[in-house]
Every structure is written in C-alpha cells, then in structure tokens.
Amino acid sequence: MTVPWREIADRVWIRRYESLDQTIGVIGGEAGLAVIDTRATHRLADELRNEVRALPGTLAAVVNTHGHWDHAFGNARFFDVPIWGHVRCAAMLRERGEAMRVECMERYPTNADDFRAVEITAPTDLFEDRATLELGDRRVELQFLGRGHTDNDIVVTVPGASVLFAGDLLENAPSPWFGDGYPQEWAITGQALLSLVDGVVVPGHGEPFGRDFAERQVADIGELARLGVEVAAGRLGADAAVRLSPFPADETLEAFERVRLEAVDGRAERD
C-alpha cells in the first residue's frame, strides 16, 4: 500500500515509512521544498525523491537532523541541492560512516548490497549553533540545542506553522536509542527543546505528537540519567536501577554505560 503525504500544517508534510518506522518531513515555500533527512540507502533515497515530486514546488534544500546512517546515507542522491547539517554531523559521517556501513551490512544481510552501494556523503552547508533557510515567503530555523542522542542533533522549526522536527532527540517508537547518547546532557537539551514546542512535534521515528508526550519523554530521559549517575557513583545497584527505569532493560543498561562515559569525559576535561 502506498503511504500518502500528510499535510500537518500549511505546506508542511510528513510521510511515515514502514522501514525503521521512520518519519520524513518536507517544508514548502515559494522558493521550493526542504526535505528533512534522506533515509538509509540510495534506493530508499531515490524512492523518497520520486515521492517528493508529488508535492507542489521544486526541491531546494535538504536537512540532516544528525549523522546516523538511517538519516543521512541517502545524501548522495540529493547532492544537487544544499545539504544542511551540524558541523559534527559532517564529522560523524566522514569519521564513522564506513564503520556504520559495515555494521549495517552485517545487521541487515538481505540489504547488504544496498548498503554496499552507498556513497557516504556529508552535508555541505554547515553550522554550529543556528542557521536559517530562506524558502521565499517562509523561513526554516535550524538549531543545535546541545548534545543528546548524538553530539550533533539539531531541531528544525517552522515559524508560524507550530511544527518542530525533533529528529531522534524524541521518538514515538519503543524507546530512544542511547548508544551514541549523552543522557545527562540529553535531559538538559530536552528542556531547551520543550521551550520551542508550540504545536506538533515530529519525531525521527513514529507518529507525531504534542507537548504532553514530549514532556513525558524528556522527564523519562531525565530520570534515566539520574539513575545512571546513582549507579556510576555506586549508590545504587544496576539491577535495582533497571527495575526503576522508564525504559526497557537493554536500553537502560546501554544508557548507564553512556552516563559512565560522560563522567569520565567530564573528569578528563577538568584535568
């Protein structure tokens, strides 16, 4: 069954894909369309690009919400327009892109040829704190609020449309992924994100939601970080902390390891 574009605000569309339960966005203005993320392979990016043709306007720009493979491995198929991303998004793809590709080939053997064909392509238009895309009668605001799911997550807001694209800082899927995360900082970044929410939040995976869900997930990440600090300090056993966690056991233990590494990094910076 073909999944249609859904217009969730004036000239703001989303398409939710069964593959990885990924949600892709498009923002339209008089000067063209900005696509939020490019999917996981060239084949999937080609499919996306073809589907974008159904929307009014020509392709003007692409935004990578962060540098993970499922959001940026399709970049090469959009290289004829500016690809926006955080400076560390580009660094992640250049430094870790090949390792991510190999991991994907091993994890998804039936799609190994698709991953083998990927030309790892970093974003071309980089920023550190914030940038603005001009789409004629509309601005699109890109902001880095702090480390969270990775060290390069950004949020995309559309002034006047009450829509925020959160990337994987928030997910309406089984749970966020903490493997490259910074749980303590993520909780702080989440609070900054909440200050920008005035309507619909579009996650990188799953169905869009409102402020209540966003507040609950940010609070859950904060509680997870607090438990991780207690475990790292030896004040709480890992088994007990897992039972108290708002997230499943495997994700919780992965987050606790990331909290431990945050503490090590913090000590190294102080030294």
Image (cartoon, rainbow, N blue to C red):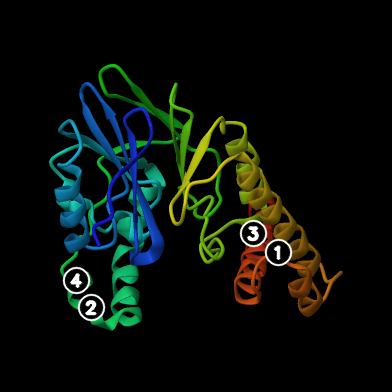
**Residue visible at 23% across and 58% down in the picture:** 2
Point out the image quarter for the N terminus: bottom left
Q: Which residue is mark 2?
A: 112
Q: CA distance from mark 3 to mark 2?
A: 33 Å
- Of pointers 3 and 2, the one earlier in the residue sequence: 2
Q: Is residue 256 above or below residue 267?
A: below
Q: Answer with mark 4 or mark 1, whichever residue precedes in sequence.
A: 4
Query: Which of 266 and 144 lies nearest the eye of the viewer?
Result: 144
Which residue was labeled with disc 3? 262
The amino acid pointed to by label 3 is Glu
Q: Position of residue 172 (x, y in %)?
A: 52, 56
Q: Residue at x 54, y 38 (%)?
A: 145
Q: Name the front one of labels 4 and 3.
A: 4
Looking at marks 1 and 3 on the same chain, the residue that comes earlier in the sequence is marked by 1
Q: Amino acid at mark 4?
A: Asp
Of labels 1 and 3, the one closer to you: 1
Q: Label 1, on which residue? A: 246
Local crowd at mark 1 within 10 Å, few (<14), some, or many (≥20)?
Answer: some
Q: For residue 96, which numbered disc appears in the image?
A: none
Neighbour tally class for label 2: few under 14, some 14-19, many 20 plus, Cα within 10 Å: some
